[in-house]
């Protein structure tokens, strides 16, 4: 399997079937959704620790995350931050 996981091989096969018209759009979407990586959640403290360990300013760290300095600066008032989706929830939510 050339180092590929079973799910990668299955997804590749379904994708090939979709390309030649043997798998419909709905089937392809379901397989795409199943292959998405799990979104990791980080606390504000963890985000701050990552930034500090990387020796990055808030401005540079914000650029890496494609967000604003204001968002990076507000981590302390949020209970968690999901990097992939930029989902933020207040402590009292």
Image (cartoon, helix red, strand yellow):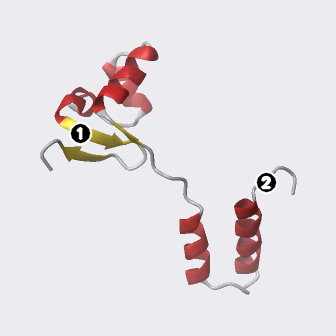
Task: Give the mark toward the camera: 1 or 2.
Answer: 1
86 lies above or below 59: below
Which label's residue is closer to the chain start, 1 or 2? Answer: 2
Neighbor class of circle 1 (other Cα within 10 Å; few <14, some 14-19, many 20+) is some
Q: Residue 54: image x %, image y %?
A: 46, 17
Q: Residue 88: image x %, image y %?
A: 26, 45
Q: Residue 15: image x %, image y %?
A: 71, 72
Q: Where is the N terminus found, in terms of image quarters?
A: bottom right
Q: Quadrant of residue 21?
A: bottom right
Name, please, the residue furthest toward the front: 92
Marks 1 and 2 sit apart, C-alpha to C-alpha, by 36 Å
Tell me the residue at 39%/25% (across/down).
Answer: 61
Residue nearest the viewer, comparing 20 with 77: 77
Tell me the residue at 74%/69% (across/down).
Answer: 10
Secondary structure beneath disc 2? loop
Q: Circle 2 sits on which residue?
A: 4
91 lies above or below 55: below
Q: Quadrant of residue 27?
A: bottom right
Disc number at residue 67?
Answer: none
Secondary structure beneath disc 1? strand
> Going by the image, does 17 lie left or right of 38?
right
Disc number at residue 79?
Answer: 1
Q: Residue 48: image x %, image y %?
A: 33, 23
Residue nearest the viewer, comparing 35 with 67: 35
> Going by the image, does 9 lie left or right of 86?
right
């Amino acid at each position: 399997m050339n180092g590929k996981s079973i799910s990668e091989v299955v997804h590749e096969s379904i994708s090939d079937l979709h390309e030649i018209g043997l798998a419909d759009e709905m089937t392809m979407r379901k397989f795409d959704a199943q292959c998405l990586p799990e979104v990791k959640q980080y606390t504000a403290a963890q985000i701050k620790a990552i930034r500090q360990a990387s020796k990055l300013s808030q401005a540079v760290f914000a650029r890496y995350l494609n967000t604003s300095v204001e968002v990076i600066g507000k981590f302390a008032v949020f209970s968690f931050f999901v990097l992939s989706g930029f989902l933020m929830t207040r402590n009292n939510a």
